[in-house]
Image (cartoon, helix red, strand yellow):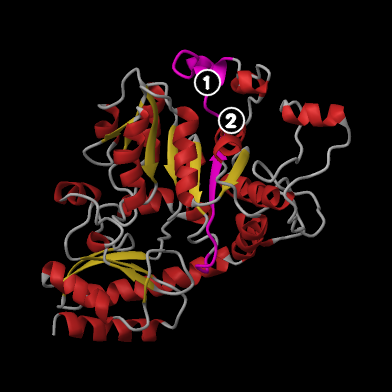
Amino acid sequence: MHDETIAIHAGYQADGTRAVAVPIYMTVANDFIDAEHANLIMDLAIPGFHYNRMNNPTNDVLEKRIAALEDGTAALVVASGMAAVSYAILTVATAGSNFVVAPQLYGATYTYFAHVLSTLGIEARFAADDQAESIGRLIDDRTCCVFVESIGNPAGNIVDLEAVADVAHRAGVPLIVDNTVATPLLLKPLHHGADIVVHSLTKFIGGHGTTLGGAIVDGGSFPWTEHAERFPTFNQPEIAFHDVVFARDFPERPFIVRARSIQLRNTGATLSPFNAFQLLQGLETLALRLERHEANARAIADYLAHDPRVEWVNFAGFPDNPYHHLVQKYLNGRVPSIITFGVLGGYEAGLAFFDSVQLFKRVLNLGDAKSLVIHPASTTHRQLSEAELIAVGIRPETIRLSIGLEHVDDLIEDIDQALASAVG
């Protein structure tokens, strides 16, 4: 089936077979048939539902659809996008290991990598930029993965995934890609060398600013058994599950099985089944929403580019954008509805614009049906130093717009009056 059909058709499972309508299961646990059935499920010998902290029938439907859209072998949904990022790293990292990161990251991701994981003995090595050569120079025999955002938030950079994947794989490590901004309808990282994909479902997939959620997708292609010494947790018996060996016993989806049974089971960032239901409703309209998001964004980016009160505009849809060739290569010419620009007058002018909007919502989120605005230097990335802000692509005057579904004339009118208040 086509991606948009998988996304919206409630009558089909991820494998294309007919299914009954999606149920909402609100119980916290599910019945075992008997002791043998319980033992087999708890030992991971057979699939099955038992306790909602680990799995649930409604969540399972969402997992199958996200996996299908990304062309992965399996998915795990969790309570938030940051939980997905955290579990993705902790599933493959151990104390004493490191991972290499392109610096253009969402603020909370940057802070978690730079200041939280270090307390667990896991080192995040930030490359100078998003280029494969810069990333490759930092990989050593203790590196457990490479992590990038396919489209940086809010920097708007687009990573050359095939080049980065080649560098990672030659070193024997997997590539983990946060594909939140692109969504699987614009870009499928697994088609370009990625091994694991993460999403904040809160953003475009949910689409209405109502529901938190995250997802991890296993590509099922990384050869864990060929790198047994580097990845012992995938290749040695897991004593918590009667000596299961994840890479041997679950060759098509070892990452997701380990993430679910070790990370989710023991730390419990579980997605509520009701949230899963709401995210499924959002997923049904994703293809239609992206078309309106993009059309509005192109018109607003063009308006900003011709306004003398605007110092600069960063929009991947412009032919002179430094990443435009990657838009053609990876996004088939499509672009996400995220625009960053600089208000003439620096930091204070950026704050004045932020304070003056009326239709745009001053919200940290993105990918909403409503149009949103944020001043990253004073909000999402305020914990970063001046040097860190430069590294992630944020200037003092930077404004990030997430363009929604309202009438474009109304959005431009609001931008015009806010610029008048900020610049005059």
The C terminus: image quadrant: bottom left
Q: Which residues are magenta?
A: 207-236
* Disc number for residue 282: none
Q: Residue furthest right?
A: 34
The x and y percentages for residue 128 are: 21, 38
Q: Are marks 2 and 1 in contact (CB under 8 Å)?
A: yes
When the figure is inspected, residue 328 is found, relative to residue 120, above or below; the finding is below
Q: Is residue 231 magenta?
A: yes
Q: Residue furthest left?
A: 345
Residue positioned 52% across, 55% down in the render: 201
The x and y percentages for residue 202 are: 50, 59
The quarter of the picture where residue 154 lies is bottom left
Q: Is residue 160 magenta?
A: no
**Residue type at tag 2:** Arg
Secondary structure at badge 2 equals: helix
Left or right: residue 146 compared with residue 254? left
Residue receiving disc 2: 258
